[in-house]
Amino acid sequence: MVQALRNPRLQGPDAGDYPSLMRILILGGNGFIGTAVASLLVKRGHTVVATTRPGSARRTLRTEITWVQADIARLSTAQHWRPLLAGIDAVVNCAGALQDGLRDDVAALQDRAMHALYEAAPPFVVQVSARTDGSASETEFLATKRRADTALMSSGLSFVILRPAVVVGRNAHGGTALLRALAACQLVTPLAHADSPMQFVALDDVAQTVADAIDGEIPDGSDIDLAAEGTTTLAEAVAIHRRWLGLAPARTVPLPDFAARIVSTLADLLGYLGWRSPLRSTALVAAAGGVAGHSAPMARPLATLQETLADNPAGVQDLWYARLYLFKPVLFGVISLFWITSGLVALIRFDASAAHLAAVGASSATAFLLTAATGLLDIALGLAVAVRRFAVPALVAMIGVSLAYLVAATVLAPALWADPLGALVKVLPSIVLAGVALAIFEER
């Protein structure tokens, strides 16, 4: 039996609206779905404890939620889970990872950790899963979800499993962010698998269904597909988003399979540097087969894609985000290559580089040391910015080093400002680019 708790923050007549108030642990509480679920459960009066990855700033944004830093993939035994489950009446699992990478171990997160959680025997589990059949069923993403779902169903625990289609809401992340980015492409829209069938569900409907399960309005043991009525093609979904952004129709240009594979391979490689792109090979396999086949009667109608977007009118910030989304990896790549190349050129043309320093009065030894140090520093910063974990400190260091170069050059060789090739003037846009990269760094 789940013990009902009274949330001390819920006062007045609304306190009786949801009589079985509980203390709920949300896994992945700072994610796209987890954030919406946590917000609604708090609104309903429940006490929410939410996990966030170590180092995430999201834990400070909602003070009414108790944030717990936890790397779920490392919770591989029941003993690891029991401290988190102390006093918890229900667990909502919104955590997941599309594909292995520097920051993710899909099997550890979606399979082994879940088996350990079920062994720890929480009173009730709401599992936000996915349809695990279809063309992408053998990908690690869906295979691990399927194993976890099967283990939950045979665990003897009270549970509800929800299988949302493509989730859309006011904000965007992953696949929905990619849809907006494709919709914002100028002149033409390049698409692979443009005719693939797609079904959608509103983020608010997913959160509402989770809350209904928590409040006992959905029977124990339910396994529910969540998708609004109607199926569109990928091309139609992109066109709907384009109209939502206020843009004129654009011609769809089919992206050949080999080109799509090249893009997904590059995205996979970026995953091992810590960047989670929705263009990775798992997503490509899923797109090839489509995201459809969801059909389950619901007690209330679910909002369609058009209705969801109409309820959340786009602003200029949405257009900016959509246009910057695919530009972001290009920006970081250009910055990385610029600094690496700058350092390599200085080292390859070592004598010429050292001669510039000697010409302004530096001794031979000093010119040698400074040329070597600055060349190696440039290369190190260029490599560091390509790794997500080190990107922010690298960008900050780039700005500081660039300013130091400008100050030193202005003092020692002010004539360089009049160099016809703009040796010093070109440093200014590189500082601006680093600032822009810092501004758009966050994923959520």
Image: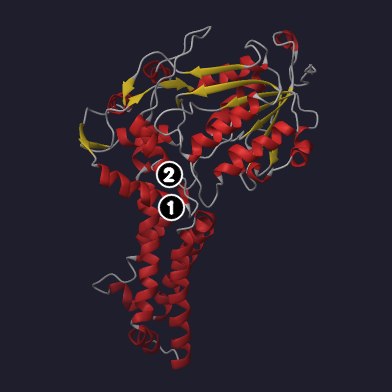
Q: Earlier in the sequence, mark 1 or mark 2?
A: 1
**Residue 166 numbered tag:** none
On screen, residue 365 above or below 142? below
Query: Where residue 441 sits in the image (x, y, percent)?
Result: 47, 48
Distance from the alpha carbon under mark 1 to that under mark 2: 8 Å
Q: Is residue 317 visible?
A: no
Tag 2 secondary structure? loop
Q: Is residue 215 visible?
A: yes
On screen, residue 393 above or below 48? below
The three-letter amino acid code for the residue at tag 1 is Leu
Q: Pick whichever, 277 or 372, lies toward us.
A: 277
**Residue 270 numbered tag:** 1
Q: Pick whichever, 354 or 156, lies toward us.
A: 156
Tag 1 secondary structure? helix
Q: Quadrant of the N terminus?
A: top right
Going by the image, does 135 lie left or right of 101? left
Quadrant in the picture for residue 71: top right
Decide: few, some or many residues near mark 2? Use Cα within 10 Å; few <14, some 14-19, many ≥20.
many
Q: Are marks 1 and 2 in contact (CB under 8 Å)?
A: yes
The three-letter amino acid code for the residue at tag 2 is Ser
Q: Residue, x 37% and y 84% (percent of image)?
A: 350
Which residue is label 2 attached to? 277
Quadrant in the picture for residue 5: top right
Query: Where residue 313 sits in the image (x, y, percent)?
Result: 39, 22
Q: Residue, x 32% and y 21% (percent of image)?
A: 232
Query: Where residue 7 sits in the image (x, y, percent)?
Result: 76, 20
On screen, residue 368 above or below 201? below
Q: Pick whichever, 410 or 332, lies toward us.
A: 332
